[in-house]
C-alpha cells in the first residue's frame, strides 16, 4: 500500500467511522487512488535537490517557534525594496522564494500558492511582509505566484489546480499547501502556516469584515490543506469564471468528502486586506454552486485544462504563468 493510501486508512481508523461509512470511505479511497495515479504519472524528475538534501544531523526545530512576535505592525514597503532586482531584504531566502531554517530541521514543509494577476504593488507588499513571518515560523517553504496570463476572465480554480500540479512536478514531496489571496497580510505570526489533520481556514478575522467571520462556511482568503485532502476533494472547481463562489464550492467538497474545517482562534487568525480594484462578478455563481455536490469527481484537479507558458525563479518567488483558456460561451 502506498504512503497516501496509508494516510487515508489511518484517517479512517482515527476517526472511528461506522461500518457503513467505512464502506463509503473505501469506495472513495479507490477513486482517490486513481486520482493519485494520474499524479504519479505526471511527476517529472527535475525537482529541487534542496528538498531531499536536508541536514539530518540537525535537531528538529522546537514545536513552538521561539521568535514569534504575536500581533504585528504592518510596515510600508521601503522605497529600496524591489521584486525585480536581487533584493537586499530577506537575504536568507534562496532563489525561487525558498527557505529552510539553518539552525534546526523544520517540522513542516509547505507550499504557499498565491493566485495572481495585475496587482504588482499588492504582490510586492505581500512578499515583503510574508517572508519574514514564514521564517519566524521556522518553516521549510516556497512561495509560488501563479499568474493567470492574458486578459481573459479570472478563473481561480484553474489557476489553483494548475499550480498545484506544477508544484508537485517540481517538488513531489510537498505535503502541505496554503492557498493564499495576494491581498491578505497576516497580522499575528502565531497563526501557523501548517497543515493539521483537517483543512484549516486561516483567514478568520479580516479587517474588511470588521474582524468577524461573515458566515460559517467561508473558506476563502487563506486555506491550508494537506496534499491528500486536496486530491480527495479533487481540488477546486474549474467552472467559476469571474468573482465569487469557487471557495464556497470548495467548502461543499470538503463536507461531501467527510472532512471538517478547522479554524484557529479569532484572536490570532487576523488579517489586513490591501485595497484593490474589483473583478467582474460572476452572475452564474449561485447557479453553479447548486450543483457542487454532483461535480466533485468530474470537475477539478483530475481534469483541469491549462497551459503552463513559463516558469521563472525570482529571488522571492517561483512564478508560474498559466493560460486558463477562454470561458466557454
Ligand atoms: N486575483 C488577482 N487578480 C485579479 C483577480 C484575483 O490577483 O484580477 C487573486 C488575488 O490573489 C486575490 C484573489 O484572487 O486576492 C481573490 O480575488 P479578489 O481579491 O478580487 O476577491 P475578494 O476576495 O477580495 O472578494
Ligand atoms: C462569495 C465568496 C466570497 C465571500 C466573501 C461570497 O458571497 O461567494 O466567493 O469569498 O462572499 O466575500
Ligand atoms: Mn481581495
Image: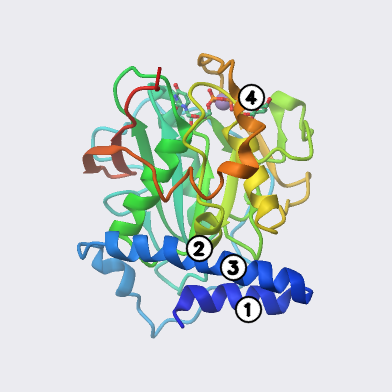
Specify whether residue 66 is in view.
yes
Looking at the image, in which quadrant does ligand 3 appear? Answer: top right
User: Mark 1 — residue?
Assistant: 10
In this rendering, would 271 be left or right of 274? right
Q: Earlier in the sequence, mark 4 or mark 1?
A: 1
Q: Secondary structure at mark 2?
A: helix
Name above or below for residue 213 compared with residue 46: above
- Counting residues from the start of the chain, the first of labels 2 and 1 encountered is 1
Q: Which residue is mark 3?
A: 27
Identify the coloring: rainbow
Q: CA distance from mark 3 to mark 1?
A: 15 Å
Label 4: which secondary element: helix
Q: Residues within 10 Å of mark 2 (few under 14, many from 20)?
A: some
Label 2 or label 1, whichever lies nearer to me, is: 2
Residue that carries the numbered disc 2 in the rendered image: 31
Query: Which quadrant holds residue 326?
Result: top left
Q: Where residue 246 appears, x then y in whole percent? A: 57, 34
Mark 3 vs mark 1: in front = 3
**Where is 260 relative to 160, above or below?**
below
**Which of marks 1 and 3 precedes in the sequence?**
1
* Mark 2 to mark 3 CA distance (whole Å): 7 Å
- Give whichever of discs 4 and 2 has the lower sequence position: 2
Q: Looking at the figure, which quarter contains the C terminus?
A: top left
Q: Which mark is residue 287?
A: 4
Q: Gap between marks 4 and 2, in whole Å?
A: 27 Å
Residue appearing at x 31%, y 73% in the figure? 52
Q: Circle 3 — which element?
A: helix
Residue 296 horizontal/vertical position (percent): 56, 47
Separation of marks 4 and 1 at Cα, in angstroms: 37 Å
Amino acid at each position: 500500500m502506498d504512503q497516501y493510501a496509508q494516510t487515508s486508512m489511518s484517517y479512517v481508523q482515527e476517526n472511528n467511522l461506522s461500518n457503513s461509512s467505512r464502506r463509503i470511505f473505501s469506495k472513495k479511497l479507490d477513486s482517490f487512488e486513481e486520482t493519485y495515479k494520474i499524479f504519479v504519472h505526471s511527476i517529472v524528475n527535475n525537482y529541487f535537490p534542496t528538498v531531499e538534501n536536508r541536514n539530518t544531523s540537525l535537531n528538529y526545530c522546537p514545536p513552538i517557534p521561539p521568535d514569534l512576535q504575536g500581533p504585528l505592525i504592518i510596515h510600508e514597503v521601503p522605497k529600496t525594496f524591489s521584486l525585480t532586482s536581487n533584493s537586499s531584504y530577506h537575504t536568507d531566502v534562496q532563489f525561487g522564494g525558498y527557505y529552510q531554517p539553518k539552525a534546526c530541521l523544520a517540522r513542516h514543509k509547505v507550499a504557499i500558492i498565491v493566485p495572481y494577476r495585475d496587482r504588482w504593488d499588492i504582490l510586492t507588499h505581500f512578499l515583503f511582509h510574508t517572508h519574514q513571518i514564514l521564517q519566524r515560523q521556522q518553516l521549510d517553504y516556497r512561495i509560488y505566484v501563479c499568474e493567470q496570463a492574458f486578459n481573459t476572465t479570472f478563473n481561480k480554480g484553474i489557476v489553483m489546480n494548475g499550480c498545484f500540479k506544477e508544484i508537485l512536478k517540481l517538488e513531489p514531496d510537498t505535503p502541505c499547501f496554503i492557498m493564499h489571496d495576494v491581498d491578505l497580510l497576516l497580522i499575528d505570526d502565531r497563526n501557523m502556516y501548517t497543515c493539521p489533520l483537517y483543512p484549516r481556514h486561516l483567514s478568520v478575522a479580516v479587517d474588511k469584515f470588521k474582524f468577524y467571520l461573515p458566515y460559517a462556511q467561508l473558506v476563502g482568503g487563506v486555506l491550508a490543506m494537506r496534499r491528500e485532502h486536496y486530491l480527495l476533494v479533487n481540488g477546486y472547481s474549474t467552472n467559476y469564471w469571474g468573482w465569487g463562489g469557487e471557495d464556497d464550492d470548495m467548502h461543499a467538497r470538503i463536507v461531501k468528502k467527510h472532512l471538517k474545517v478547522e479554524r484557529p482562534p479569532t484572536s490570532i487568525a487576523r488579517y489586513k486586506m490591501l485595497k484593490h480594484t474589483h473583478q467582474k462578478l460572476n452572475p452564474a455563481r449561485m447557479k453553479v454552486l447548486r450543483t457542487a455536490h454532483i461535480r466533485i469527481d468530474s470537475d477539478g484537479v483530475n481534469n483541469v485544462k491549462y497551459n503552463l507558458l513559463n516558469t521563472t525563479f525570482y529571488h522571492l518567488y517561483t512564478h508560474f504563468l498559466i493560460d486558463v483558456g477562454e470561458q466557454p460561451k
